[in-house]
Image (cartoon, rainbow, N blue to C red):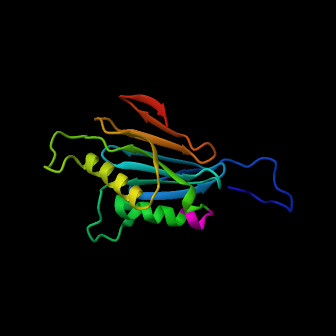
Amino acid sequence: MKVYTSEREPTHQPQERIKVGIADFAVGADETTLVTSGLGSCVGIAVFDSERSVGGLAHAMLPYADGDDDEAKYVDTVVPELVEEMKRAGADSDNLRAKLAGGATMFEFTSADGSIGDRNVLAVREVLDTLDIPLVAEDVGGDHGRSLRFSVRTFELRIRSANAGESVL
């Protein structure tokens, strides 16, 4: 984020690190890094406007809201709220792109509709399509948890897993 200490713009902008919890989201700009951990069947959705240097990260637990007031808990309610918060921070909805990680199958039992992880991934794709936001990269599925580090400056999504190592989207 820009820091102003006088009338002149500073020569160095300090990096801010924001932790995004489970059923949570955050938005940052410039030098902000957004981090979350504990993604099993949950999904991490990184949305960004590279032209305006604004990005956001959501950690959703379930695909569709069921009347619960906790909108950050559900993919179908948190993604639109994340986008609105990004627009308030200066993002242009025409420039938005997304990256996705998580949606693992952590347990053997699944319903006829698939695992929670599979349903979360499908819900993200549907919501992004409805909002006309291209999904440009993903690391989903498998049977391993993930931790994410999203740099708003570079728009890199770093994914770490004990079983699968580290990758960058």
Q: Position of residue 96 (x, y in %)?
A: 53, 55
* Residue visible at 30% across and 35% down in the picture: 142
Q: Position of residue 24 (x, y in %)?
A: 43, 58
* Residue visible at 30% across and 56% down in the picture: 62
Q: Which secondary structure class fits the magenta region best? A: helix
77 lies above or below 139: below
Q: Quadrant of the N terminus?
A: bottom right
Asked if residue 44 lies in the magenta stretch, the reply is no
* Residue visible at 44% across and 54% down in the picture: 58
134 or 30: nearer the viewer: 134
Q: Position of residue 11 (x, y in %)?
A: 82, 48
**Residue 93 picture quarter:** bottom right
Q: Position of residue 38 (x, y in %)?
A: 38, 44
164 lies above or below 35: above
Give, as a single range, the part of the protein colored magenta: 86-90
Asked if residue 89 lies in the magenta stretch, the reply is yes
Q: Is 100 placed left or right of 2 in the picture?
A: left
83 lies above or below 153: below
Number of labelled discs?
A: 0
* Residue visible at 45% across and 65% down in the picture: 81
**Residue 49 picture quarter:** bottom right
Q: Is 13 placed left or right of 56 in the picture?
A: right
